[in-house]
Amino acid sequence: MCEANAYLRQPDGREKLVMENVYRLRPEGRRLLLENIFGEQLLLDAELARVSLMEHRLVFQPRRPD
């Protein structure tokens, strides 16, 4: 399978797990919609910081104010 775990970078630099088994990532306006294999959805007001397909990791950081 090709799922990944999604992490949100915290202000102290640590990465907090926010969703496991993500198989779909889709823009929804200025937000990102994540969906996992169980049908759970998460709408993040964040931007993609890093993707590691080998490690099955998606790392997001809070969106910077405009």
Image (cartoon, rainbow, N blue to C red):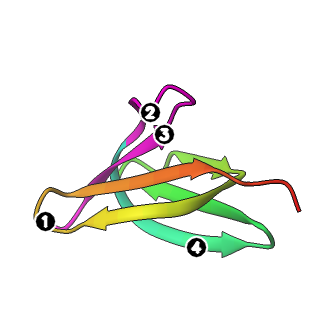
Where does label 2 land, which residue? 13
The correct choice, above or below, for 11 with respect to 47 in the image is: above
Q: Looking at this rendering, what residue extends furthest in the front direction? A: 12
The correct choice, above or below, for 60 with respect to 23 in the image is: above
The residue sitting at 56% across, 49% down in the picture is: 61
Left or right of residue 1, residue 32 in this image: right
Q: Does the magenta stretch include residue 6?
A: yes
**Mark 2 and mark 3: Cα distance apart in space:** 6 Å
Q: Is residue 29 magenta?
A: no
**Mark 3 and mark 4: Cα distance apart in space:** 19 Å
Quarter of the picture holding the C terminus: bottom right
Q: Which-is-in-front pick, marks 3 and 4? A: 3
Q: Where is residue 37 in the image (x, y as percent from the top left)?
A: 35, 54
Q: Which-is-in-front pick, marks 2 and 4? A: 2
Q: Do the numbered discs 2 and 3 sit on residues whose CB atoms are within 8 Å?
A: yes
Quarter of the picture holding the N terminus: bottom left
Where does label 1 land, which residue? 1
The residue sitting at 49% across, 41% down in the picture is: 8
Where does label 4 land, which residue? 26
* Residue 12, label in figure: none
Residue range of the region highlighted in magenta in the rendering: 1-19
Residue nearer the viewer, 47 or 40: 47
Where does label 3 land, which residue? 9
